[in-house]
Image (tube, rainbow, N blue to C red):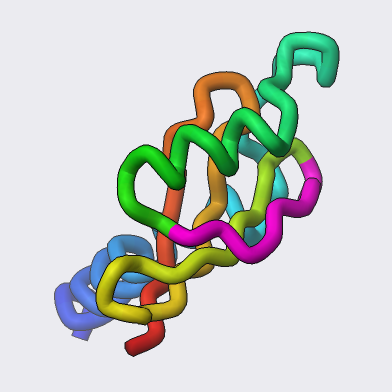
Amino acid sequence: MKTMNVRLAAAVALIALPFAAHATGSCTTEPKTKWMQDKEVSSQLEKQGYQVKRVKTEGSCYEVYALDKKGNHHEMVVNPVDGKPVSEEVNE
């Protein structure tokens, strides 16, 4: 029984891990003076083939809503200092 609970807890942790930054709103501890502008984040993602619809500040992260080349909707939590996605949810 104890082994099953440990396995269940581990599975839940693995599923929840990508969304931890979103849930806590913690992507960076850097001050906003070191953050990329939202336009820079949009431009960086557009160079990767996304059509960015919206960028908003959410805690110490940027939350980006975009479409890929196939028209799939992406909701990304992005580190505002380097512009790299921390987590991503895709809705086809």
What secondary structure characterizes most of the magenta part? strand
- Which quadrant would residue 50 be assigned to in this image? bottom left
Q: Percent x, y for residue 44? A: 47, 34
Q: Percent x, y for residue 85? A: 44, 43
Q: Percent x, y for residue 19? A: 49, 61
- The stretch in magenta equals 51-59
- Which quadrant would residue 34 be assigned to in this image? top right
Quadrant position of the C terminus in the picture: bottom left
Direction from residue 89 to residue 76 in the image, left or right: right
Query: Relative to residue 84, is residue 13 depicted above or below?
Result: below
Q: At x 63% / y 65%, what residue is drawn? A: 53
Query: Relative to residue 23, is residue 82 depicted above or below?
Result: above
- Which quadrant would residue 15 be assigned to in this image? bottom left
Query: Relative to residue 7, is residue 38 depicted above or below?
Result: above
Q: At x 56% / y 34%, what residue is drawn? A: 79
Residue 8 in the magenta stretch? The answer is no
Q: At x 35% / y 67%, what residue is drawn? A: 68
